[in-house]
Image: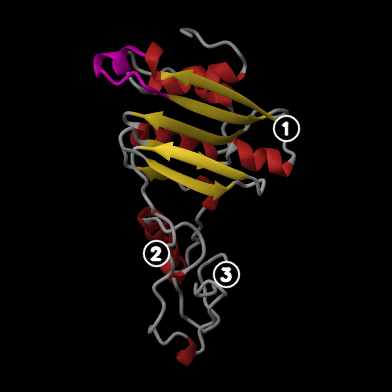
Amino acid sequence: KYVSIQYTGSDNSSKSLECDRLIVSVGRVPNTDGLGAEDVGLKLDAKGFIEVDQNCRTGLPRVYAVGDVVRGPMLAHKGEDEGVMVAEIIAGQRGHVNYDAIPWVIYTAPEIAWVGKTEQQLKSEGAAYRAGRFPFAYNGRALGREEPEGFVKILADARTDRILGVHSIGGLASELIAEAVVAIEFGASSEDIARISHAHPSMSEVTREAALAVDKRSLNG
């Protein structure tokens, strides 16, 4: 038994797919119905999100909104960071959230994690980039864990080598993505990661190998 679906692709062409199971996990919306936001003068956008500026200020004085009721990804850590930013601003400090460095994780088996741009986004923007990819199958720790399926892929600016996006599928992808978040936050290049010593045997070596692969010089692939 299998599931067969028909759908329209991004190019407006008709496509079909057969699979064992189909999970429908789309359609999340902000839970602002019944909040009374508009009654007190808070503006909502067309999707029901409370309108805020880059510092999560609403249109009302001394009123902020964070998390799933404002624009951006509906992720717990994103909402937490916004809350910290707002607290810092209220305390007279300089708060900031870099939305380009918010990691996404799907806790499936295998895990899926990414941060920054996708290849599709870069192509649509006409951005010149280089890609480096390295499989878990060549990593001793992955083989020891009996989880050799998966990879890490790094996308870097073709001219400056600055890391634009990192993607991983496989065991512990949710943990590996943290290094990528730090790299993007501080504007690191793929060469920066390639030159950093990574413990052996560890899954993090795959990230280093992917960084080396951007320049087509991975050590073990």
On the image, the x and y values in percent for residue 9 come to 60, 46
Rounded to the nearest angstrom, the CA distance separating label 1 from label 3 is: 31 Å
- Of helix, strand and loop, which one carries label 1? loop
Q: Is residue 170 left or right of residue 209?
A: left
| Residue 154 place in picture, x, y as percent | 54, 28
Which mark is in front, 1 or 3?
1
Q: Residues within 10 Å of mark 1 (few under 14, many from 20)?
A: few
In the image, 147 versus 180, the foreground residue is: 147
Q: Secondary structure at mark 2?
A: helix
Which comes sooner in the sequence, label 2 or label 1?
2
208, above or below 59, in the image = above
- Amino acid residing under circle 3: Asp
Q: Is residue 215 above or below residue 114?
A: above
Look at mark 2 in the image and give the residue it sits on: 83
| Earlier residue among tags 1 and 3 | 3
Return the residue at label 3.
53
Residue that appears at 30% across and 34% down? 109
Q: Position of residue 198 (x, y in %)?
A: 39, 19
Nearest the viewer among 212 and 20 is: 20
Q: Along the polypeptide, which appears first: circle 3 or circle 2? A: 3
Residue at the top extreme, as displayed: 220
- Residue carrying label 1: 128
Q: Write the start and end of the magenta stretch as one range.
A: 139-150
- Mark 2 vs mark 1, CA separation in Å: 35 Å
